[in-house]
Image (cartoon, rainbow, N blue to C red):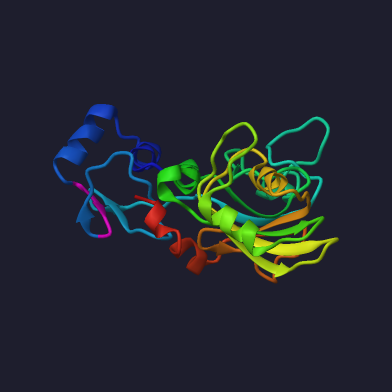
Amino acid sequence: MRLDKLIEEQLHTPRKAMKRLFQTGQILVDGKIEGKRERNVDSNLHEIIVQGKQLKTNEVYFLLHKPQGVVTANQDKQHQTVIDCLAPHDRHPDLYAVGRLDRDTQGLVLLTSNGQLGYALMHPEKKVMKRYEVTVNGPLTAADQAAFEQGIVFHDGTTCQPAGLTIQQSSSEQSQAMVMLMEGKFHQIKKMFLVRGVKVIALKRTAIGPLTLTDDLPIGTYRRLYQEELESLVDYFH
């Protein structure tokens, strides 16, 4: 969470006093004077000392294996949401999904109360790689791989950034592949394959940056991030 918000919540520090704390070097993160009020911190990753007092955060991080038919939203009048997949006691009011998945798409979703982290993971400048398993209703060839590497151009003229396409199995009726990309345009993968003359019939996200869908997460289940997974995200906390 934001460092200044943490200090305000736990020490009830007025705004002027907060400014003085930063100006006089009384705020330490991992033993170093921190001057950025908006610095994103988590006490499971950082030692946070303010005027000699150690502060603790209480952010929440869940990995969900989203099933098909579930919408990536907090509320929906017609469909089950990713929040509905959680046990009632885990439905933290500040939770939100990092990176949208279409209702008919299965796969990895990060649910967190740490809005700054979510923003960093989705910001184009961070170039966070996302991996998908795809099934299409026709053949895939080396020409398709080359087109993905060059950057697919949609029918409306929109140009995608270069993406990786690894063909795992190809036949005239159905093919399986892995797609790696750093963008998140609306229905992007489906549109990319339509440009190449095939239709996506199954789509599953298996990774977001260092976070990977693991065997211990069956469809429809979730778990808290392991400590090593949280540590793998430390570069997105600055």
Q: Is residue 26 above or below residue 62?
A: above
Magenta: main secondary structure:
strand
Q: Nearer the viewer, residue 123 or 202?
A: 202
Q: Is residue 208 above or below residue 217?
A: above
Residue 206 place in picture, x, y as percent: 64, 61
Residue 218 place in picture, x, y as percent: 75, 65
Q: What residue lies at 54% left-to-right and 48% top-to-bottom? A: 151
Residue 20 place in picture, x, y as percent: 18, 35
Apparent side of residue 92 relative to residue 82 in the rendered image (left or right) = left
Residue 52 place in picture, x, y as percent: 24, 53
Q: What residue lies at 45% left-to-right and 51% top-to-bottom? A: 127
Q: What residue lies at 69% left-to-right and 49% top-to-bottom? A: 196
Q: Is residue 85 above or below residue 233?
A: above
Residue 231 visible, this angle: yes
Q: Residue furthest front?
A: 143
Q: Residue 24 falls in which quadrant of the image?
A: top left
Q: Residue 164 falls in which quadrant of the image?
A: bottom right
Q: Nearer the viewer, residue 51 or 81?
A: 81
Magenta stretch bounds: 26-30
